[in-house]
Amino acid sequence: MSIFGRSKDTAPEPTGVDAAALTGDYTIDAAHSSLGFTARHAMVTNVKGSFAEFEGTLHLDGADPTASNASFDVRMDSITTGSAERDAHLKSSDFFDIEQYPTMTFRSTEAEALGGTSYRITGALSILGTTKPISIDLEFNGYAKDPFGNERVGFEGTGELLRSEWGLTWNAALETGGVLISDRIKLNFDLSAIKQTA
């Protein structure tokens, strides 16, 4: 993901950030990050959920931002929505079929700068053995060195997908019209990553 601008020659860096200093490999700090989603329920309200267990890496390249990349692996049995019954249904073969497909993965393929500290990363998302492209809009939240000497970067992100495109088609019709669960799912991310040292 490019956090340095549209090109290394013409675009300004985010205020107060030295692109060269940010260059390197990072590991997502899952204890200070979140991966969440929102689905419309019964056409009238939103149900939110998240994944408690995941890991990921980033490579940020200050000299050539387009060479930056991201990789995530999410344990599907860690899904939580605040309802044990609903979580069990989501883990079943009606939805994520976690016995056969225990992991959801994302591998970036392209990055671009949208201006300021806003960026977009596109990659391959694999669910239920189906891999399709998805784009995520990101906001670079900054760089800091924590009290333990870790160099950190932070990003917030949002995206949308149609779950049916990944084979997540279970639904139920409502007497008043419409369906129980929306096809469109909103994604949200809040990520903290720690720079790795040699």
Image (spheres, grey):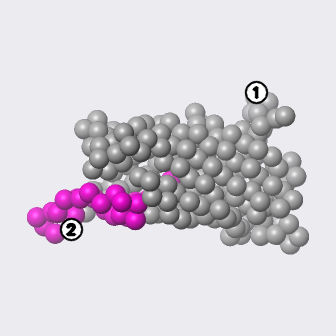
Q: Residue at x 84, y 56 (%)?
A: 62
Q: Is residue 30 left or right of residue 161?
A: right
Q: Secondary structure at mark 1?
A: loop
Q: CA distance from mark 2 to mark 1?
A: 52 Å
Question: Image quadrant of residue 148?
Answer: top right
| Location of residue 77 in the rendering, given as x and y in whole percent from the top left corner | 40, 37
Q: Residue at x 58, y 33 (%)?
A: 31
| Location of residue 173 in the rendering, given as x and y in whole percent from the top left corner | 17, 63
Query: Looking at the picture, does residue 147 appear above or below residue 55?
Result: above
Q: Residue at x 64, y 41 (%)?
A: 28
**Outermost residue toward the left?**
175
What residue did someone put label 2 on? 178
Identify which amino acid the numbered label 2 is placed on. Answer: Gly
Front-most of residues 145 and 174: 174
Question: Image quadrant of residue 15?
Answer: bottom right
Queried whether the magenta region covers residue 99, the answer comes back as no
Queried whether the magenta region covers residue 173, the answer comes back as yes
What residue did someone put label 1 on? 148
Q: In which quadrant will I find the N terminus?
A: bottom right
* Residue stretch in magenta: 162-188
Question: Image quadrant of residue 150?
Answer: top right
